[in-house]
Amino acid sequence: MQRYSILDLSPIPEGGTAADALANSASLAQAAEAAGYHRFWLAEHHNMPGIASAATAVVIGHVAAATKTIRVGSGGIMLPNHAPLTVAEAFGTLATLYPGRIDLGLGRAPGTDMETARALRRHMAPEDAFPRDVVELMAYLDAPAPDARVRAVPGQATHVPVYILGSSLYGAQLAAYLGLPYAFASHFAPAMLEEALEVYRRSFRPSPTLAEPYAMMAAGVFAAETDDEALFLRSSQVLAFARLRMGRPGKLPRPVRDLSEVPPAMMEQVGHALSCSATGAKETIRGQLAALIARHRPDELIVTGMIHDPAARIRSFQIAAEVLSDLCEKRNAA
């Protein structure tokens, strides 16, 4: 493993507002920069009362303005919701304002329910245009052909790095075919992680962008001074995920000791979905993260964790950074 990074959903906590969530994201990014994280990504979700990063490019600009050196980007932009040209213009503008610091991770899902997807796109195309749209978008970010009739301004020749995101074999195959880095959403959909990484590495074709495969995986992290405190902090995400699955999405709940409101069958589903994670005190998460890294051999681990208290969330990522820094040094020295 070469690097470690953060994925933030800008959670809106119970008792708080979207403004609180956006301020918390900026504060977390500043702490992440100080702690040595390589990049800070935000994700596009719509019609979600507990997530404030719907206008992802705008939030990326907010976070980039609050930091100095950490890379900031999308994990990801859901490309079916947007015209490739508008994404190129938005991220070209960000790259112009914050040169050398902007990433563009692209996903194929709508990032919401189908009714909201219709509200976003207006017209639901029956064909899968994602591969074509990725290629079109990359062309807008490249140096334009002399006879190009349509250009992204700003955007052209900014060469914003593009990443393919996914939770199935589809994204792995496309990233390999295009010679792009690949990030797997194992923090909430770990089932096909092993197979997807194997397909990506085996099928990878070198490109002008990337000579060798570069695989990222995501994992939840909930760290605290004790194992018990970390489990308590994690209960907020467990509850939020369970309520979403049960059709009751809301703001990020306060942590609880008693999770009996979640039926056993649903708790089993949630446990599987969130199984790619590390929870506990520093030495506890060290063992859990080391096992994940040894098993899947990512080039980069991107960690996430929705914790209700912003100070506890920052402390969790600081503890994780201490562990990940040590693990990177040991693996690179081996």
Image (cartoon, rainbow, N blue to C red):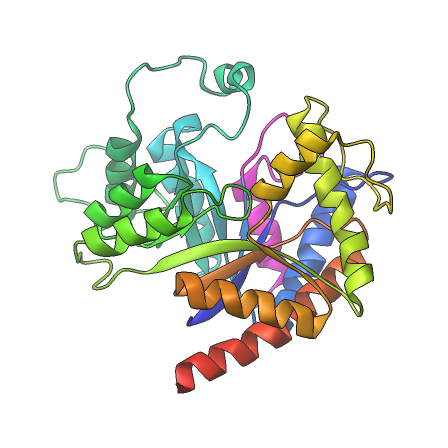
Asked whether 151 or 52 is in front, the reply is 52
Give x and y (percent) for residue 199. Answer: 26, 49
Asked whether 216 or 63 is in front, the reply is 216
Residue displayed at 29% across by 47% down? 141
Give x and y (percent) for residue 25. Answer: 68, 52
Residue ranking furthest to the bottom: 333
The answer to whether residue 152 is seen in the rendering is no
Residue displayed at 82% across by 31% down? 261
The answer to whether residue 78 is seen in the rendering is yes
Chain part drawn in magenta: 44-68
Would you say 147 lies left or right of 305 here? Answer: left
Give x and y (percent) for residue 46. Answer: 59, 28
The image quarter in which residue 210 lies? bottom left
The image quarter in which residue 230 lies? bottom right
The quadrant of the picture occupied by the N terminus is bottom left
Residue displayed at 48% across by 59% down? 98
